[in-house]
């Protein structure tokens, strides 16, 4: 679903509800910031929400009360790009790293909305990026690549369940 102000990708929702306008206002009030609509205070609010909880950062990124809209692909890829261990507690994530996650999310989200495709690999040449827009297998560094060698360090990409979703990460280079 897309409007002039927002985009919602409803593949695989865990629940769908018919809501009244008051219900919608309550849900939006509890939701974490969304980089497409949050304004200048969104980054600071995200950093506060992420770094104040003792829950694994990989779980926090999927919590809509912490940040709106990060799905499973972006979670895996953002953590990889930040070289951040998905099991690091939010309270152990430096504020600067949390800010960098927000800024990266903003760039990735803007690119995904503009192109209609989630390409998260920063190592692609312009020609390879154009190919990745057409070839799903080239789009991600860790997501969907369980057991394959990490593109950065060669360690096998690991897979586990976290927050009810499949988590992909590289135990070799996501150590921060």
Image (tube, helix red, strand yellow):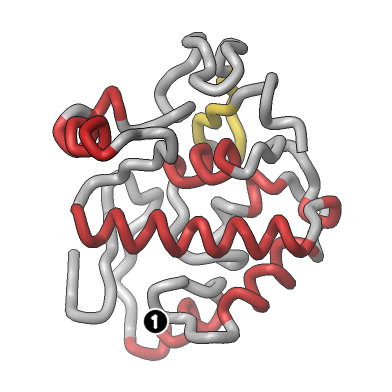
* Residue name at image x 29 percent, y 54 percent: 112
Quarter residue 141 falls in: top left
Helix, strand or loop status at disc 1: helix
Residue wearing tag 1: 24
Q: Which of 176/75 is in front?
A: 176
Residue 23 at x, y percent in the picture:
42, 82
* Side (left or right) of 90 relative to 162: right
Task: Give the quarter of the image for residue 111.
Answer: bottom left
Residue shown at the point (43%, 49%) measured from the top left: 71
Position of residue 6 measured from the top left corner of the image (x, y, whole percent): 28, 74
The residue located at (61%, 35%) in the rendering is 162
Front one among 127 and 149: 127
Q: Is 10 displayed left or right of 174 in the figure?
A: left
Q: Quadrant of the C terminus?
A: top right
Vertical comparison of 57 with 138: above or below: below
Observer-nearest residue: 80 or 57? 80
């Amino acid at each position: 679903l897309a409007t002039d102000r927002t985009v919602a990708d409803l593949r695989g929702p865990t629940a769908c509800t018919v809501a009244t306008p008051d219900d919608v206002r309550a849900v939006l009030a509890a939701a974490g910031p969304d980089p497409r609509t949050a304004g200048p205070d969104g980054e600071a609010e995200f950093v506060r929400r992420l770094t104040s909880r003792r829950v694994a950062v990989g779980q926090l990124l999927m919590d809509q009360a912490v940040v709106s809209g990060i799905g499973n692909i972006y979670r895996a890829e953002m953590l990889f790009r930040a070289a951040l261990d998905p099991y690091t507690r939010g309270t152990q994530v430096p504020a600067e790293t949390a800010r960098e996650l927000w800024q990266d999310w903003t760039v990735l989200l803007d690119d995904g909305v503009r192109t209609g495709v989630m390409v998260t690999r920063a190592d692609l040449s312009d020609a390879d990026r154009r190919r990745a827009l057409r070839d799903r297998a080239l789009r991600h560094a860790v997501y969907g690549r369980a057991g394959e060698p990490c593109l950065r360090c060669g360690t096998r990409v690991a897979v586990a369940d976290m927050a009810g979703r499949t988590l992909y990460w590289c135990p070799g280079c996501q150590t921060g």
